[in-house]
Every structure is written in C-alpha cells, then in structure tokens.
Amino acid sequence: MSGQPSLTVAVFGESYLPYLSGVTVATEALARGLGAAGHRVVLAVPRPAGSALPTGGGADGPDPEMAWLPSYQGPPPAPPDYRMPWPVPSDALARVRAARPDIVHAQSPFVSGLMARHLARAVGAPLVFTHHTRFGDYGHYLGPLAAPGAALVGAYLGAFWAGCAAVVAPAADLAVEIEAAVSSRGGAARPVVRAIPTGIDLPILRALSPVDPRPRAGWPPDTIVAVSVGRLAREKSTDLLLDAFGDATRTDPRLRLALVGDGPLRGELERRLATGALGDRVLLTGRLPRLEALAIAAGANLFAFASRTETQGLVLAEALAVGLPVVTLDGPGVRSSVRDGVDGIVVARRPGHSATLLAEGMLALAADPARRAVMARAARDGAERFAASARIEEMVALYRSVGRGRR
C-alpha cells in the first residue's frame, strides 16, 4: 500500500452469489481483491434464499464483512436464484453506515445504487460506480416498450452518473462512450471516467485440472471440441453461435460444441437439438460452479464466442488464462481481451453473414493444431495483463484521487 493508510470501502451489489454472472464475479473479485491489498471491505448485497450462504465464486482473498440486504426473488426472466434487494431500511444498511466508509462503490445504478448514493451523501464519502451492463441490449425483454424503456434508462443513467465522483468502465471503448455521454449533458457535475477492467486470479485458474467433456457427452476421443461459457440468451447470441457451429460441422464433422451455462433460451435450444442433425454433437451442461465450468473449458480445444452485449468480455480473459485460443465475433469489449492473430481470431460482425464468418474462424483453428498450440501458449503467457492485483491497484489509486479532500 506504499505507506498510505488503508481504506474502508462499502461495496453495493444488485445481485450476488450463488447467482453467477460477470457482475457477481466482478463484485466478488473487487471485494476480495481489496481485502487482499489490506483494505477493509463491507459488502452490501441481497441475501440469498434459504439458510445456506454462498461460499464464493472462485476469487482469491479474505472474506469481506457481509451486510446481507433484505431480498426477494427477481421476476421472470430472472433465474430462480436471482435475488434483488428490497429498498427498505435494514440492519445491514445500519452496519454499513456504522463502518464510516471512505469510499462507497456501487455495482448497479438501480436499487442498490440508490442505497449506495444515499449512504455516500450521509457519510460524506465519494460515490464510485462501475458500469457493468449495456442496458440497451436487453430491450427485447420489454417487447413493445423497448424504445421508450431505452430512452428512460438512458436519461436515468445520465442523472445517476452526475451524482458520482467517478464512473468506471470495464473496457476502453465503453469509457469513451460514457465520457461522450457525460460531456453532452454539460453542467458542472461531471464525474471522472476511467477504464479499469475486472481482474482475474491467475494462480487459481492456472491450477485448474482440465476436464475433458468428451466422455460425458459420449464423443470419440479424436473430436475437436469448441466450448462456450455463459448465459443462454438472445443478447448473448447463443442461437447465432449454434448456427455457426452447424455451418462448421458440414465442412469438418469432427467438431463438437459444449455450451456451459443456462438461461431463457435453454428450452428452445433443447427442442432445436432434439429435432435437428446437431443433437449428438452439442452438449448442454446446464449451470455449473464457475471453476467447474472453466475446468471444462480448459479441457476443450477452442473457445467460441458470439455475444453482442459485453462491457469487457470477462469470460474471454478467463478462457485465455486457462490456455484456450478464442474464435469470436467482434463487438464491445472483445478487443480488450483478445489479441487478433495472437491468441485468437476476431471476425467481423456483419448482418446476415456473421454465422458464416464465425464458422470460418472455427474451421481455421480446427484444421490447424499447430496454430492452436501457438495461440494457446500466447494466451497463457499473455494472461498476466489480466492480473487482479494490478486492477485493484488501479482502483485504489482512483479511490484516493477522488477521495482527496472530500472528507
């Protein structure tokens, strides 16, 4: 900590473990990483259902002090364990306030974000917000209300940013977008905008024992396995990924696909596989603990990705860290992780042609084991750039810069 005093940081999350997502993984990584760096962390997140509390998602560092917010089950399409905080006074909020945090860090702009803002004002601490989600990409869940909903959310976000001392974007391209939006609003209240990706705990991922998905799926040992880890949802382009895989198998029948995760498209995918030619070539694992999911990824030959709604593409960094070359459609956050031609292939996203281009990338790696091996080494060797400790140092430096003179 370079001789500087430790900080007390209150971190607020809209969702948390055992629900696994990029946001919950990032929230745990931040809390444990700050603790490992010697800072005190009070983590205010929704209490999970039942009496069993989550044991962790795989991040390294000490357990934070937990302030479990009263919670309820999120409405559809939220999964069964997606808990959301009630916006009511609670012992948890009193516990966070009693800690007198130097920094309040919100992981969401909504209910927990408003709690964080209220607390920051009450104790005179700067409010830092990490913009984890491109909310505009989820409009399809609103049906005919998508357009007015996007306008309302955009206006709300602008107002929320104005109340923050700093806004953190997990990727440089998103930071540019936020900076432009903040500047266009004008006014005196302008937060600092910084690009600080979520770091990953490399020793934990490198210590994983790869799990070969072939025996589980009944595939021959000489098959070439592409894997994708994430939510099965339209915004993640899972259907497009399956289209691309179908195209690729017509050229190279050795290819197989493991889809690791669950989501609202699960039923549709199962029906499609039951009636088509891909049924015995695709494995749907369902939801798995994070490290178990990444162990299966490590046992595959390549990682395939098609999501159009990433801020950072955290799972891409995780795949590279376990030594897996990536084939991905270009999109937000992708190039923050994947180095095209070095540890992966980034193909253009072109309406009507994206599946074909992604299939060509998969076929290129499937046909060239030497190239896969070179990219796998580059992925492992280059993963130091994702190290959690460096990201925590950047975050703490931001905390100190916005906190200077504010207390």
Image: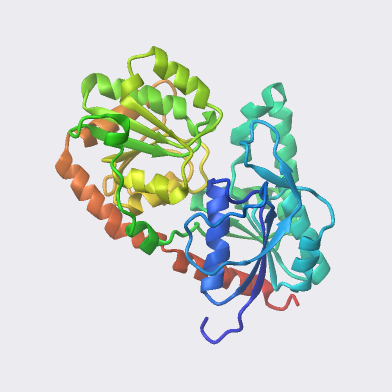
Q: Nearer the viewer, residue 348 or 265?
A: 265
Q: Is residue 248 shown to the viewer in this render?
A: yes
| Residue 65 to residue 259: above or below | below
The part of the image, by quadrant, that contains residue 368 is top left
Q: Residue at x 42, y 51 (%)?
A: 291
Answer with left or right where residue 97 lies relative to residue 315: right
**Residue 45 % position (x, y):** 68, 55
Q: Nearer the viewer, residue 250 or 225?
A: 225
**Residue 152 % position (x, y):** 75, 37
Answer with left or right where residue 233 lies relative to residue 188: left
Q: Nearer the viewer, residue 311 or 155?
A: 311
Determine the residue located farthest toward the left in the rendered image.
370
Answer with left or right where residue 344 lies relative to residue 233: left
Q: Residue at x 70, y 50 (%)?
A: 109
Q: Is residue 337 shown to the viewer in this render?
A: no
Q: Residue at x 58, y 64 (%)?
A: 31
Determine the residue located farthest toward the front in the rendered image.
51
The part of the image, by quadrant, that contains residue 302 is top left
**Residue 309 % position (x, y):** 53, 38
> Which colouring convention does the figure follow?
rainbow
In which quadrant will I find the C terminus? Answer: bottom right
Answer with left or right where residue 396 lies relative to residue 224: right
| Residue 31 to residue 338: above or below | below
Q: Residue at x 62, y 41 (%)?
A: 81
Exactly how many numbered labels are in the figure?
0
**Residue 30 % position (x, y):** 55, 62
